[in-house]
Image: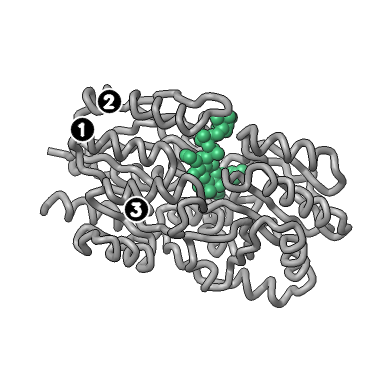
Amino acid sequence: MPIRTLFLFGTRPEAIKLCPVLRHLKSTPDLFDVKVCVTAQHRQMLDQVLAAFHVTPDVDLDLMLPGQSLFQSSSRILAALEPVFANLKPELAIVQGDTTTTLCGALAAFYARVPIGHVEAGLRTWDMAQPFPEEMNRVLTGRLADIHFAATPWAAANLHREGVPPERTHVTGNSGIDAVLYVRDGLANGTLSSGVDWSFLNPAKRLILVTAHRRESFGAGFERICLALNRLASRDDVEIVYPVHPNPNVQDPVNRLLANRPNIHLIPPLDYIPFVDLRRRAYLLITDSGGVQEEGPSLGKPILVLREKTERPEAVEAGTVKLVGTDENRIVSEAEILLDDPDLHARMGRVHNPYGDGHASTRISAAIRSFLRK
Ligand code: UD1
Ligand code: UDP
């Protein structure tokens, strides 16, 4: 009998990293009976990904509230999951990453006595405030999980140090790299198209693509980031495109400080395929996103990371990512170094991706089968 396997997710990055895995498991219906439950912790940004990967959820809890607090989202998600487990009776639950949905999904599975697989396990900064609340979410999810899919040997070693038995830990690569390579190669060979008219971009200028949304930067951090972007935009050889996260804590400072400025395009979050396409055209990425850091080397772009600490040290060691925090002067000076030193820029872009080779989903599927056999 195929194993009843429930995928639980709710935000954009979880969807990007789980759609390749669930599609892979669905391709073997004799082995896996796959069901998909979305909390819709994100609404529009989740739907953008579901559409790109042609995934229709079996259950859509539609839980997002505008400006939701952590208390609201976590309590509502946990409560809404009880009947999902009661109705679907999964034999295995799969969660990904470190969001509120991840933690609540794992806790719900634990309460329902369903084994848990955690995709992208073992990331750590060892600082519960950075990123907040994600570091705590992934530590707790790791404690709840029964099988851990680590993207890299470093992440697996973190789990071993915390007492997770090696036989419960599998180094699989990051399934986000499966997604980005699929889209990158599809755009290159013409089987995919972004469908976006980029004619608003000035080909004579170098494109800096920006994303930022972390809670620990809300307030003063975002003010400094915006001031830095304003200074960079005053150079006449660059233009900035910033798809702005819909969180009101992001929208407010970004619109107040950056709207209608020369050389700055504030746009809504891009669908995944256009976002890959736009990065191919960018000179430099400035971001606090986890996923964007991982995908960078596959797109050959240097990345300045708007954080003091990272749970993804491999990209820093590989030389493709540099941590610049949220200090205005540091952001400007590090960006200017890359703008003014094309050799350094080329070296930072020419890096083997330490996060994966595009086959994480295959390895996760094999690891689940071996776990279930045992
Ligand atoms: C969440 C995750 C974070 C992840 C990020 C990816 C938690 C605690 N945080 O943060 O780890 O990096 O997603 O983007 O789970 N909103 C919309 N439409 C959307 C999505 C969000 O309007 O499609 C707005 C809503 O007002 C919502 C707010 O953004 O209340 C915040 O969303 P939430 O999921 O609580 O937090 P994120 O900051 O997106
Ligand atoms: N992304 C996207 N459109 C955008 C910005 C980001 O599709 O406008 C993708 C990006 O390629 C990556 C993922 O969203 O795969 C990262 O999500 P996010 O930055 O929201 O969360 P994090 O990875 O920091 O948890």
The amino acid type, in three-letter code, at marker 3 is Ser
Q: Which residue is mark 3?
A: 361
Which label's residue is closer to the chain start, 1 or 3? Answer: 1
Q: Secondary structure at mark 2?
A: helix
- Disc 2 to disc 1, C-alpha distance: 8 Å
Mark 2 belongs to which amino acid? Answer: Glu
* Residues at discs 2 and 1 in contact (Cβ within 8 Å): yes
Separation of marks 2 and 3 at Cα, in angstroms: 28 Å
Residue 310 horizontal side relative to residue 21, left or right: right
Q: Is residue 113 above or below residue 358?
A: above
Quickly name the residue at label 2: 82
Quadrant into which the N terminus falls: top left
Q: Residue at x 29, y 58 (%)?
A: 363
Please indicate whether residue 302 sits to the left or right of residue 84 in the image: right
Query: Which mark is nearer the camera, 2 or 3?
Result: 2
Could you tell me which quadrant the C terminus lies in? bottom left
Point out which mark residue 292 bears: none
Would you name the residue on which mark 1 appears?
A: 112
